[in-house]
Amino acid sequence: AQGPAYSVEIPLYDAGSPTRAKIIAQRQLENRPHGKYIRMLLPAKLYMSIRPQLIYSDADDGIKLHNGGSRGGFFYYYQFDNDLELMFQYEAGLDWDEDTPFLNASDASNTNRRLSYFALKYMKKSLILGKYWSAYYDIAGFTDQFMTYGAQASGAFSASASGTGRADKLIQFRTEEDAYDATVQVQLKHDALRDWNIDYSYTIAGSMIYKGWENIKLGAAINYGKFDHITPEMQNDGIDGDDLSSIIGVTYRNNRFSTNAVLSYMKNHTIDDQGVYFDSAGAELYLRYDFDESFRIAGGGNWLFPEDNDYDGKYNIKNIILSLQYTFGEKTFDDMVYMEVSLPNGKLA
């Protein structure tokens, strides 16, 4: 015998939890006056990712416990009847080595805030306000796939206030089409985060990724930071103009094998261990092979060289990286253990 049939709407990621799906369905079927507002709040979730590392280095004595980018936060998602999507996320790093508090929304010079943004998405278009991954990182992220090392030569995390990594105080527009993805962003006046007592008047950035070929994506991005003016202190630190970073990248993915590569060129963006800026060219390579659903191996390297005739330093990066990874649980590589080796041969001092 078959009873009455009813239809309910359950968000996709809630459908994987019988308990949450049951609560949502019951609220809709009971049709209580407050049920609509409860359903609007249910998509909110708290999360935490703990990432401890045991690291051995020739420069240290023995094996030490490090924080490998542990993080936690709050994420909210809601889809309206007209298909408009609303998103809000706050994410902070969890650091047991320092006294930085978990909830700290202060300026970037003393915060562990990773993300804090508000987004509206309709169909394939998104508007994002706050602190979010930059347009430049759309390309730099091609090779930022290692678990511990890497991301040294793309410029994504140099001069972080310029907006090449996670850009703060941004206004960003994204579109995702069948053949390409495009992003444009602007950061308004903000601190340059040095002892120069100077600001960026603004920074602008854009990226384009072409994905019309099978298994291949090709992309490029540029990021420009305009200083209010160049002070004598900045000139002493090697700054002779505005901050400009450019990058191109390519990815190829087969069933089990993938290769990602980027080439970058930066002016007044790369900084050495003495706080001196210089123009540079860099390259990063990431190769990966999946043996099965549980094991994968990765390798590649980072290379960066000065391209500045006025720079007297010897700073350069020549780094080979190897990684072995094993995933457990749902086999998504969100839960994993790994061993990664870095073999540097450059001059970081």
Image: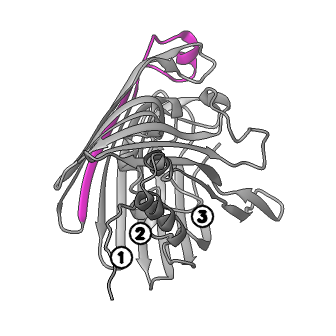
* Residue 17 seen by the camera: yes
Q: Secondary structure at mark 1?
A: strand
Please tell me whether mark 2 or mark 3 is closer to you in this view. Answer: 2
Residue 87 picture quarter: top left
Please state the horizontal and vertical placement of residue 55, each as a whole percent of the image.
Answer: 72, 63
Number of numbered discs: 3
Please tell me whether mark 3 or mark 1 is closer to you in this view. Answer: 1
Q: Nearer the viewer, residue 173 or 283?
A: 173
Screen quadrant of the C terminus: top right
Tag 1: amino acid: Phe
Which comes sooner in the sequence, label 2 or label 3? 2
Which comes sooner in the sequence, label 2 or label 1? 1
Kindly indicate whether the residue at mark 1 contacts the one at mark 2 (C-beta within 8 angstroms): yes
Asked if residue 50 is among those painted magenta in the image, a careful observer would answer: no
Provide the residue span drawn in magenta.
216-243
Which comes sooner in the sequence, label 3 or label 1? 1
Which residue lies under the disc numbered 1? 257
Kindly indicate whether the residue at mark 1 contacts the one at mark 3 (C-beta within 8 angstroms): no
Which residue lies under the disc numbered 3? 343
Q: Which disc number belongs to residue 13? A: none
Asked if residue 217 is among those painted magenta in the image, a careful observer would answer: yes
Q: Residue at x 53, y 22 (%)?
A: 192
Q: Nearer the viewer, residue 318 or 83?
A: 83
Up/down of 166 relative to 302, above or below: above
Q: CA distance from mark 2 to mark 1?
A: 8 Å
